[in-house]
Each structure stands twice: as C-alpha cells, then as structure tokens.
Image: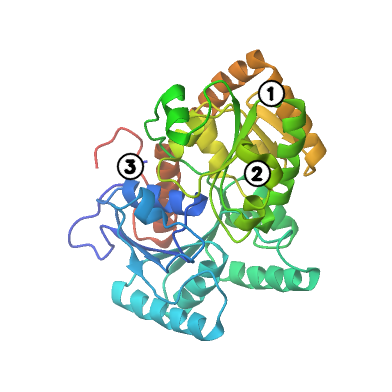
Amino acid sequence: MVIARRSADCAAPSRIRVMRVIARMNVGGPALQVSTLMRGLDTELFDHRLYAGFVGPDEADYVEQRAPDVRVCRVPTLGRAVRPADDLRALRGLVAAMRRFRPHIVHTHTAKAGALGRAAAVLARVPARVHTFHGHLLHGYFSPAKTRLVVQAERNLAAATDRLVAVGRGVRDDLLAAGIGRPGQYAVVPPGTTPAAAPGRAEARERLGVPQDSLVVVYVGRVTRIKRPDRFLAVAREVRRAVPATRFLVCGDGDLHSDLESAADLGDALHLLGWRADVETVYAAADVVLLTSDNEGMPVSLIEAGLAGVPAVATNVGSVAEVVRDGTTGLLAPPNADALTRHTVTLLRDEGLRRRMREAARAWTTNQFGAERLVRDTQDLYTSIAVTRGWWPAPLQEGVDR
C-alpha cells in the first residue's frame, strides 16, 4: 500500500505516531510479534515507540535473549501481577508518557496492558486505540464468576477501542461469541516471523546432549497450568512405553517447572533445557513438536516449528488449527493425553509420514506466517485508521512512487 504525501504546509501529520504498550516482554508469541513490528514498520510513515514493564522472576526476557536491538521505554510497575497500587502508578505513568509523546494511535498487547493502556489513552485523549488479542482468557484461566467479570471488562474496553486485532479466526470468533466487540471492529492478523539460521540435525543434537539415534519430541513454551505440563508428562510416559528410544526436550520455564523436575521415572529421557536464546537449535534436533495446552491463541512455537520443518502433535484449541493443517503438517487431538499419545506414536513410528509432513509444514508456514506479511498487515491497519480520520489521503495504487 502506498500513501500519497500531503504538501508541507498541510496540517495533517507526515508520520503517524504509534505508542505500543505491552505488560512485559517475556519469551513468547506477543514479544516476538512486537519485536517484529518494532523492527519492520516503515519509519518514513510511522514514528513508533514501545512501552513495557519487566518480566517476572520465573520468566526469560525476550529483549535480552533475542531482540537486544529493540528499544524499550520502561514502565516499572507495568508487569504481569495484579497489584492495585502498582497498577495505578502504571496507569499514571502511561498517561504522562502519552501526553509527552502525543501518539495518534495507542496499540496495546496482552490483557493487562490492554486494560491499563486503553484506559490511559482515554484519559490522555489519544485519538485512536487498537488492541491485539494474542489469545483470550475466556476459559481455562479463572473460575466462572471471575471469567464473567473479565468478559464484562473486555466488553467495556472494546466499546472504547477503534480496532480489535485477533491473531486467528478462531480467537476472533470466540471473542465475538462472548459479546466482545463488533464484527466490523476486528482484523485478523496472524503472527509472523523470520526463522534464525539453524545448525544441522547432528550438530544440534550434539549441542543439546541428545543421542544421535534417538527419536526426539520437543516442547517449547512456558511451563504453567494452562499449558498442562501434567498432560505432557502423561504423554511422555506412554510414548516411552510404546517407543522406548524417544527423548523429550522441554525448552522453557515457569511456575510449574518443579513438576517436570520431579518426574524421576523418566530419567535421562527427559531433558530440561530452560529458556534458550537459540531455540532454532531445539527445533533442528526434533522429530516432533508437542503442544498439550487447554487454551491457546495462535502458538508461535508451532509456527517456528513449521518454519523449521518439524511436524506437530497439538491440542485443537484456539487458533491452533490455523497453523497446523491436520493430517498434512501435523496431527490435532482433543485435549486429552490418550489422543495425543496415539498421534505422537503414529508419527514416531512412520518416518515417511514425518518426512512428508516436514516438507508440507515448511512450505505452509513460510507462505502464511512470514515477518513481512505481519508488518504489511499492521501498516495497512494503521493506514486505514489514518485515512478514516483524515490524517492521510486515500492510498495510491501499488507501484506509484511516494
């Protein structure tokens, strides 16, 4: 999309100021997407800044590990934990930052930053507000009573938001079914990334201390309740009985990491890697990637696995089916250990099937989930707001010089 420049004496801005707000830049899908956008947006069209709090003690910092080039304006009390006094200070800090920067658009990511960031944008009279749902909290997180409160809060926030972004159609449809926002408010913008150069399979296994002749199943992500590490362990135990040569790698950490450490019966079949900056090495060593979650948005771990040519076995929740093409790039199952075990054993026992799925996964994800597509979709979203608000004229046709 190409924007026609207004004359220098016109009051419309030549660049749109975008203030991006996220609670914390912990290793995961939201931080990856935010980093991709901070690197990729056209700086001739957009003046954009990132505001975030700090990661928790059981989390890895994405900026430190994988994006040291991304500049973050820190809001010290904007973090994951809900603490009313700190949240009020974070709200005040965001309002003050908005009044200094004077953004045209505030774009928030993740639930807590979405609430505080949009409230601050209203108080600071920011003209346009955008929020990205990287998933949702509609089930699997809270009690029914608390979930109803969350839904009502999101409905109220949606009424004060210009555009709502969902990472997948399934996520959007779940939110609409809960009465959050209107269909016309939504844009579906899937994640996008560029894979890092990876070592060869033999070298990757040597680095990770995995036998060259073993079959390797990997899990990449936070080790927390919604991800169901208990289900992962149940699958690992049953798979080992059926395919004894299997090794399991866990790349990640979280509040339930001790549950994995206590799985003594798996012995040296379970490798706990913690957070690693070279996640591409983990995928390079893998035969299958396993996801056992009760709830997901659109898991970037499955996108990264697909880009690396690793077939997936995953629970069919959220927008997972928009990443993993069941029967073509991987196998999907309901959220129970028996079905996940059957699919994992099927893949491990059939080298030809794994090879076909590897090739299909790499082709599919490369086409659908590239970084350039994510940046282009986001720039088009901002441009549509700028045109609607009268800040910019309507776009010229492609191929016309700016």
The residues bearing labels 2 and 3 have C-alpha atoms spaced at a distance of 31 Å
Q: Nearer the viewer, residue 207 or 301?
A: 207
**Direction left: furthest residue:** 8
Image point (35%, 70%), residue name: 74
Q: Pointer 3: what residue?
A: 2
Q: Amino acid at mark 1?
A: Leu
140 left or right, relative to 373:
right
* Rendered location of residue 248, percent (x, y): 61, 36
Q: Pointer 1: what residue?
A: 347
Q: Pointer 2: what residue?
A: 319
Q: Amino acid at mark 3?
A: Val
**Direction bottom: furthest residue:** 85
SS at mark 1? Answer: helix
Q: Nearer the viewer, mark 3 or mark 1?
A: 1
Query: Could you tell me which quadrant the N terminus lies in?
Result: top left
Which numbered disc, 2 or 3, marks the residue that appears first in the sequence?
3
Query: Could you tell me which quadrant the C terminus lies in?
Result: top left
40 left or right, relative to 340:
left
The residues bearing labels 2 and 1 have C-alpha atoms spaced at a distance of 22 Å
Image point (55%, 81%), residue name: 83
Q: Nearer the viewer, residue 255 or 42?
A: 255
Q: Crowding at label 2, few (<14), some or many (≥20) Cα neighbours within 10 Å?
A: many
SS at mark 2? Answer: loop
Q: Is residue 343 above or below residue 143?
A: above
Q: Nearer the viewer, residue 221 or 180?
A: 221
Q: Is residue 215 visible?
A: yes
* Rendered location of residue 183, percent (x, y): 65, 54
